[in-house]
Image: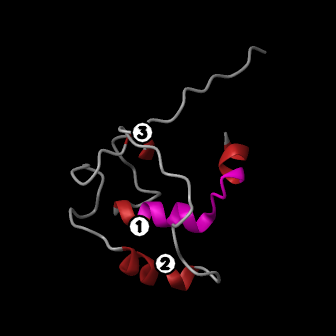
Amino acid sequence: MIAELRNKKLTAIGIACNFARRLVQPIKDRAHPGCEFEGREDATREAIRDFQREEMAARLKPFFKEPVTDHEQPRPFSLKRPAPLVSHPPE
């Protein structure tokens, strides 16, 4: 699954943009995984407001050498777009 996301051009910037746009703290203890994000009303958000791409890019710019954008990144998983089921092969 990780290799497939890499092939779809997922980057560290794309992951950071995802957390920034959702207004959640990536290492904060939360009630559910990020892939179960419920949208604007999600209880794990730090604020319930719109977060424009320009503001997101400005906040993340100090952390990256490359331009900050989430264009052409794979869409994140959510309750409306769940992650595929994954199982371990038998040992």
Q: Residue furthest top?
A: 90
Comes first in the chain, label 1 or label 2: 1
Q: Secondary structure under badge 3?
A: loop
Q: Nearer the viewer, mark 1 or mark 3?
A: 3
**How far is mark 1 from mark 2, CA to CA?**
8 Å
Asked if the stretch drawn in magenta spans residue 59, the answer is no
Residue span colored magenta: 7-19
List the residue tagged with mark 1.
20
Q: Is residue 91 left or right of residue 50?
A: right
- Residue type (three-letter) at the residue carrying disc 3: Arg
Label 1 Cα neighbours within 10 Å, binned few <14 / some 14-19 / many ≥20 = many
| Residue at x 36% of width, y 47% of height | 30
Comes first in the chain, label 2 or label 3: 2
List the residue tagged with mark 3.
81
**How far is mark 1 from mark 3, CA to CA?**
19 Å
Q: Nearer the viewer, mark 2 or mark 3?
A: 3
Relative height, residue 64 to residue 88 (above, below): below
Label 3 Cα neighbours within 10 Å, binned few <14 / some 14-19 / many ≥20 = few
Residue 36 place in picture, x, y as percent = 38, 40
Q: Are marks 2 and 3 in contact (CB under 8 Å)?
A: no
Relative height, residue 74 to residue 80 (above, below): below
Q: Are marks 1 and 2 in contact (CB under 8 Å)?
A: yes
- Residue type (three-letter) at the residue carrying disc 1: Ala
List the residue tagged with mark 2.
60
* Front-most of residues 32 and 14: 14
Q: Residue furthest front?
A: 72
Q: Secondary structure under badge 2?
A: helix
| Residue at x 23% of width, y 64% of height | 47
Residue 37 place in picture, x, y as percent = 35, 45
Label 2 Cα neighbours within 10 Å, binned few <14 / some 14-19 / many ≥20 = some
